[in-house]
Image: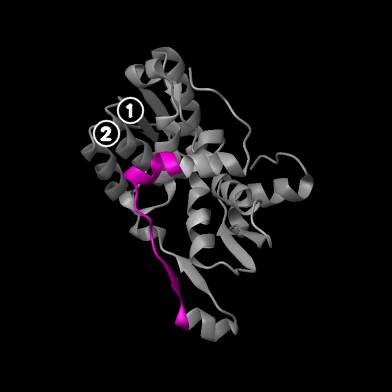
Amino acid sequence: MVARRPLDASAVTEAAALIAPHIRRTPTERSEALSALSGCEIFLKLENLQKTGAFKIRGALHALLRKEAHDRVNGVVTASAGNHGQGVAYAAQLLGVPATVVLPQGVPLAKLTAIQRTGAEALLLGESYDEAHTAAVEIARERKRAYVHAFDDDDVIAGQGTLALELLDDVRDLDILVVPVGGGGLISGIALAASARTPRPRIVGVQAAGASAFADSFRAGGVVER
C-alpha cells in the first residue's frame, strides 16, 4: 500500500525525485522584452518545452507513480479539456497502465490525436469539462478503476509544484511568482514548494475574468461554483 502523507513542501521534494527520470528539467529564461516593458527583471519557466508540451505531465505522472499496484493493473480514468489528459495518457503509456481519458465535445483535434496516439482510450462525452468529469467518475465507478482528478488530487498538486523547485533554484532571489490559475492545482503546488524557501516569494494567481471560480472562491473563503 502507498502510504498517504501530509501535503507540504516535503511532498513536492519527494515528487521531484520520483518523476525526475521521466520528465524534462525545462529552462528558465530572462525575458528581455517583458523586463524592458515592466522595469523589472522578468523570468519565464518554459514548460511549453516539457514532454507533452505542458506542465500537466508532472502531476499526472506523479499521481500514477503513487498509485497502488492493483490500481495500475486495473487502469485509471480521468477527465480533461486536453493537457491533463495528454499527461495521464503519456504517463500511462510509460508505465504500462490502461487509461481512459474523457474529453468534452469540441476538444482540439490535436489534443485528441495526441491522446489516442499513446494507446489510451479517448471518449468524447459532454459539452463542458464539468460534464466530462461527471461521466468519467461514473465510468471509473463502473469499471472499478482509480480516478485521477485534474487538480483536486494531492499527488497531482505535489507533482505540479516541482516546476517551482526548479524555478527557485534557477533564480534564487525572486520576489514574486505570477501563476496562471485554472482549477488551482498548479498554484497550490507552487505555494507548497515556495513555503520552505527563505525569503518566501509572494505568489500572485491570475485567472480569466470570464472563468473566475477559483479567484471568487479564494475571496469567499470557500468553494464558489461557476
The percent coordinates of residue 112 (x first, y second) are: 29, 42
Amino acid type, mark 2: Gln
The percent coordinates of residue 154 (x first, y second) are: 56, 34
Describe residue 90's horizontal placement relative to residue 17 as left or right: left
At label 2, counting other C-alpha atoms closer than 10 Å, the crowd grade (few under 14, some 14-19, many 20 or more) is: some
Residue name at image x 63 percent, y 40 percent: 8
- Could you tell me which secondary element the residue under label 1 belongs to? strand
Confirm whether residue 80 shows in the render: no
Confirm whether residue 32 shows in the render: yes
Describe residue 222's horizontal placement relative to residue 127 as left or right: right
The percent coordinates of residue 9 (x first, y second) are: 61, 44
The residue lying toward the viewer, choosing from 178 and 167, is: 167
Residue name at image x 45 percent, y 33 percent: 63
- Label 1, on which residue? 99
- Could you tell me which secondary element the residue under label 2 belongs to? helix
Describe residue 171's horizontal placement relative to residue 120 as left or right: right
Is 97 situated above or below 52?
Answer: above
- Label 2, on which residue? 93
The percent coordinates of residue 151 (x first, y second) are: 53, 39
Amino acid type, mark 1: Ala
In this picture, which residue range is highlighted in magenta?
17-32
Q: How far apart are marks 1 and 2 (CA)?
A: 8 Å
Dividing the picture into quadrants, the one containing residue 180 is: bottom right
